[in-house]
Image: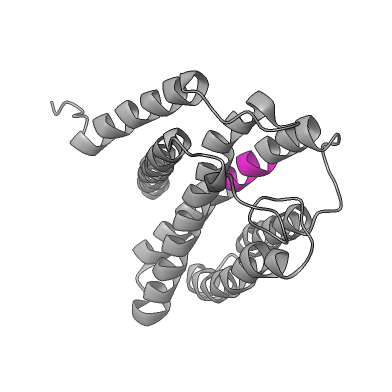
Amino acid sequence: MNKYKLSWWKILTIILLYYTVIGGFLIPVPRLHILNETIRMNYFHVPMWFAMISLFGYSVWSSIQYLRTQNIESDDRAVESVKVAFFFGCLGLATGSIWANATWGAFWTNDPKLNNTAIGLLIYSAYFVLRGSLEDETQRGRLSAVYNIFAFAVFIPLIFILPRMSDSLHPGSGNNPTFRLFDTSHNMKLVVYTAMISFIALGWWLYTLFLRIRAIKKLRDEI
């Protein structure tokens, strides 16, 4: 009987996540007006977006591979990575709303980055509706692959380009400076970069679990 072995990168993920949580709450942060201790949300909110973008990017690559080869495994990889990316996107939106309430006085404001992110996730939610409406495996894989590429091509300008072209409350958008200007001791950078790696690795870990569950369901349906 084979025993489940914890890969080195999974152990590393656990260690990095542990450091992110401990460092995120204990390492001193710049004392900025209004933000105060809520600036620590940066250690979790931003890395969630990086995990989301990484997985959405991988899903697009998998969709392109499916269109090239018609290999159903590529379609499986695409849909499962979209699921995990969407999950991190919802977490990022939720943590962003909590942070907004603490700093801006409302859970939701008329901010272009907030609104565009919500629109982008709605576009991706239609991806699941599309897949659920098609029964033929080949047609479902082909149409959802094309839609996935389209969704990513729209999502990136929505959350990265358009907010920088208009006034936004977000740091790094409009005329607002980024936190790196105030992080003179570089403590925040160390935690944020560690958190980015750990959340991306966590997202990949979840993706492998989802992919394994999908394979088990397929085997069960064939029996």
Residue found at the very far bottom of the displayed protein = 68
* Residue 205 magenta: no
The quarter of the picture where residue 8 lies is top left
Left or right, 205 with reference to 103 = left
- Expressed as whole percent of the image width and height from the top left, the position of residue 208 reads 35, 44
- Answer with the quarter of the image where residue 118 lies: bottom right
The foreground one among 134 and 102 is 102
Magenta segment boundaries in residue numbering: 87-93
Whether residue 28 sits left or right of residue 115 in the image: it is: left
Given residues 178 and 120, the one toward you in this image is 178
Which residue is outermost to the front? 184
Residue name at image x 69 percent, y 61 percent? 120
Pick the quarter of the image with the N terminus.
top left
Residue 94 in the image, given as x and y percentages of width and height: 69, 37
Residue at x-position 76% and y-position 38%: 100
Estimate the x, y position of residue 6 in percent, counting from the top left.
22, 30
216 shown above or below 15: below
**Residue drawn where x is 68% and y is 59% of the image:** 173
Quarter where residue 98 is shown: top right
Residue drawn 20% across and 35% down? 7
In this rendering, is residue 27 above or below 120? above
Q: Quadrant of the C terminus?
A: top left
